[in-house]
Image: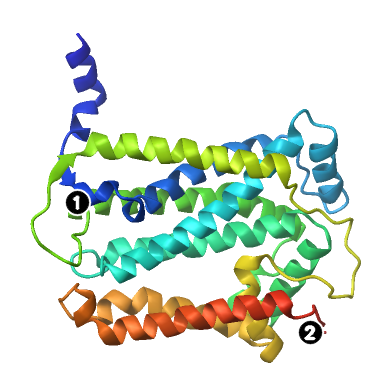
């Protein structure tokens, strides 16, 4: 009876062999990110029951969530800290994939779907920042509208003039509907491609012991529970910031730390706000199609590794610079 039940649910399909290194932390970062995303979606669904995207009520509704809704402050903390964990794990996952050359043939489109998921994560963070509708959210929206205006017809669909619906309401729709749908679709493609092409081999090569995929699932459950514990602890001891309703015509805040590299570049040249994301994401998208060296060994990829390290150090330097630089006015 149990075997027939497993067969009907397709549980037996999880019994296939994978290399043992798949259970090591560097190769479980993607799974940890997925678990954190589930936590993010569940907490976000709860928050939507109390959030009002109207300009006059958005900030007040968040204050209501954290001050009056039973455990609302905790759920909001879970949501916030899940974002922080996802940002860290997805970044480390990207670094691991690059260092192990897991983007190379036949995994080009696995990498591409991962880069697109990374861009969607940025979209979630940006729209979530705006939805707070405090000074930080207002200034984030102001920067967005400025960039869309400079893009002309290309940016029109993302501008305040495109629809009679207030743009905060449109950002809310984007945050809770369009971005999740795109994420689920791309995530399904990403997981499907991993299943098809299997776990990438270690750069060192050599034979490796094979284990059942169910051991990987058990490992992810352990890491997932630990991740939930970490998120919960942070939610209990550090409350996400929330300012009062915004004041028009001033710039006194900085973006979330994930965007401080862009903030630093904006301080140098304001039009970096438009061009820098394209400059960063275009090489990432094209990487597997231009790096045709078949070797995955670190010692035989010195140029690629050196370029990666330089870019990584520049990004870290820009983030640190953004932390220590005073907020300033960039645009009219």
**Left-right relation of 124 to 299:** right
Task: Measuring from the top left, give residue 15's x and y in whole percent.
Answer: 18, 33
Please give the residue where the numbered disc 2 appears in the rendered image. Answer: 331
Regarding residue 57, the answer to whether it shows in the image is: yes
Q: Position of residue 317 (x, y in %)?
A: 58, 81
Depicted 14 relative to depicted 201: above or below: above
Residue nearer the viewer, 237 or 77: 237
The answer to which image quadrant residue 297 occupies is bottom left
Q: Is residue 52 above or below residue 70?
A: below
From what the image shows, is residue 280 above or below residue 256? below
Secondary element type, mark 2: loop
Figure check: 267 above or below 107: below
What residue is shown at x 80% (from left), y 44% (from top)?
62
The residue that mark 1 highlights is: 196
- Direction from residue 199 to residue 317 in the image, left or right: right
Residue 68 image point, x, y percent:
85, 32
């Amino acid at each position: 009876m149990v075997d027939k039940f497993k067969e009907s649910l397709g549980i037996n399909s999880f019994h296939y062999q994978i290399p043992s290194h798949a259970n090591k932390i560097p190769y479980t970062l993607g799974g940890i990110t997925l678990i954190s995303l589930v936590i993010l979606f569940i907490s976000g669904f709860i928050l939507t029951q109390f959030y009002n995207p109207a300009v006059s009520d958005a900030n007040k509704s968040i204050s209501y969530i954290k001050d009056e809704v039973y455990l609302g402050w905790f759920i909001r903390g879970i949501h916030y800290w899940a974002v922080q964990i996802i940002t860290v794990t997805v970044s480390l996952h990207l670094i691991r994939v690059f260092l192990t050359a897991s983007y190379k043939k036949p995994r080009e489109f696995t990498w591409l779907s991962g880069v697109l998921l990374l861009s969607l994560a940025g979209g979630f963070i940006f729209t979530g920042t705006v939805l707070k509708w405090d000074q930080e959210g207002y200034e984030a929206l102001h920067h967005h509208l400025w960039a869309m205006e400079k893009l002309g017809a290309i940016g029109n669909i993302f501008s305040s003039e495109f629809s009679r619906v207030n743009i905060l309401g449109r950002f809310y729709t984007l945050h809770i509907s369009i971005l999740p749908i795109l994420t689920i679709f791309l995530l399904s493609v990403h997981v499907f491609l991993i299943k098809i092409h299997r776990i990438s081999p270690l750069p060192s090569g050599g034979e490796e012991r094979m284990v059942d995929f169910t051991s990987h699932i058990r490992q992810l459950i352990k890491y997932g529970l630990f991740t939930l514990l970490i998120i919960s602890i942070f939610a209990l001891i550090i409350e996400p910031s929330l300012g009062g309703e915004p004041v028009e015509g001033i710039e006194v805040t900085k973006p979330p730390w994930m965007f401080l590299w862009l903030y630093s570049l904006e301080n140098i040249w304001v039009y970096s706000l438009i061009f820098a994301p394209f400059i960063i994401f275009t090489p990432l998208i094209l990487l597997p199609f231009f790096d045709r060296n078949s070797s995955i060994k670190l010692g035989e990829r010195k140029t690629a590794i050196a370029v990666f390290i330089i870019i990584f150090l520049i990004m870290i330097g820009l983030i640190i610079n953004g932390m220590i630089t005073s907020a300033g006015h960039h645009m009219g």
